[in-house]
Amino acid sequence: MNMPLKGGFNCVIATMCNYLETVHGIPADVGTVSFNRSYFKVIHADGCLMTVSPEEVSLEFLRDVGADFVYPSFAGLPDAWAYIDWHLANRGVLPVSINLRYDILDPLPFDNDYWHFHLIVAREPGGFRMFDQFENEYYFMPEQQLGLAIDTPFNYRFDGKFTPFLLTDCMEAAADVRRKVQGKRRGGAELAAFAADYPLEDNLQAGVSFIRGLHRYTAGRPSETDMYRLMNYHHVIIKCRDMFQTALEQAGWTDVQPVRQLREQWETYRHLLGMALARRTAEEFDRLETAYTQLITNENALLRSLSARSAALEGEGAR
């Protein structure tokens, strides 16, 4: 494998980009895939506040460029091991869905097997060299532990078939897919202008609904699993904002201070969320709702200031 692997705010989208680039030789970055009208949108689902489904975002992008996800199925672990060796030898890195109870870098004390994809990079004595796209780190996993990590209900969700791996394959000619992917790249001014689509009312409604739902915890402490989900989804939202700042910087946009402020404000709000879940009083959740409303109002204003700046620059260039 000669191409460097990329981390991302979401491992599903990063998986797709890494596979397109390392296996098909089609450069794709997480930002190009993610930047659409729903990028800054948050939703209230399954008791949590989270970003829009990464599977939906990925599939929308893939089908626009002539590609798709493929989940090969296997009779059991022996067949899966043979496929890993074949894929590493003939195609390259292989994305695999794992249960974070058996993770190496950040193991959890409970089962969490929902959409967590790492990359198998190479076969090594006794196991595999792996890449964690969320943490952006390599690590070694013994073969026996990987077997435990992938023998999980999530990997039997397709009619009971064992599908631990996720491929991204071209449905059209690779040259056509490459051309379409390249056509989706945006410059700095385009990225800044894209912030004008900020979904203010949707985000306010989703967050208020989420926080009012937290009042259920005044009657009892959230479980360890619930606490992880509540806090980790907010961490993903923050990394989403981080990635937008990085994309602006890489595109040559110099004024990223508004986006930097967003990260700080989301971090402050996430800290308040943790405190509210620890104290579990109606008053704490009411204060959290006020803080959230202010955060989203500020985010809307800061992102629209980027859009206004972009429009002004375009106007200057037109003279």
Image (tube, helix red, strand yellow):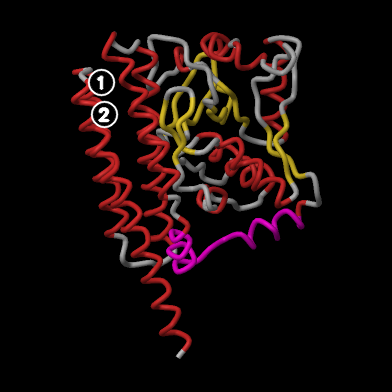
Q: Residues under labels 1 and 2: Cα distance? A: 6 Å
Task: Provide the secondary structure element on which disc 1 rests.
Answer: helix
Residue 5 picture location, percent across and down: 51, 41
Q: Amino acid at mark 1?
A: Leu
Q: Is residue 180 magenta?
A: yes
Q: Position of residue 307 (x, y in %)?
A: 40, 66
Q: Is residue 51 visible?
A: yes
The residue positioned 37% from the left and 62% from the top of the image is: 304
Q: Which residues are magenta?
A: 175-196
Residue 128 forms part of the magenta stretch: no
- Left/right placement of residue 66 relative to residue 41 reads right
For the C terminus, the quadrant is bottom left
Q: Position of residue 89 (x, y in %)?
A: 69, 31
Vertical arrangement, residue 133 with respect to residue 172, above or below: above
- Report which residue position mark 1 lands on: 277
Q: Check whether the beta carbons of the residues at disc 1 and disc 2 lie within 8 A of each other.
A: yes
Residue drawn at point x = 28 percent, y = 45 percent: 295
Mark carried by residue 273 = 2
Left or right: residue 190 versus residue 86 is left
Q: Amino acid at mark 2?
A: Leu
Q: Bin the neighbour count of mark 1 within 10 Å (Cα to Cα): few under 14, some 14-19, many 20 and up.
A: many
The answer to which image quadrant residue 81 occupies is top right
Q: Is residue 160 above or below residue 232?
A: above
- Taking depth in this image into account, of 38 and 252 the one nearest to the observer is 38
Where does the N terminus fall, quadrant-wise?
top right
Between 203 and 230, the one lying in front of the other is: 203
- Residue 299: horizontal and vertical position, in percent? 33, 51
| Closer-to-camera residue (46/55) | 46
Say if residue 81 shows up in the picture.
no
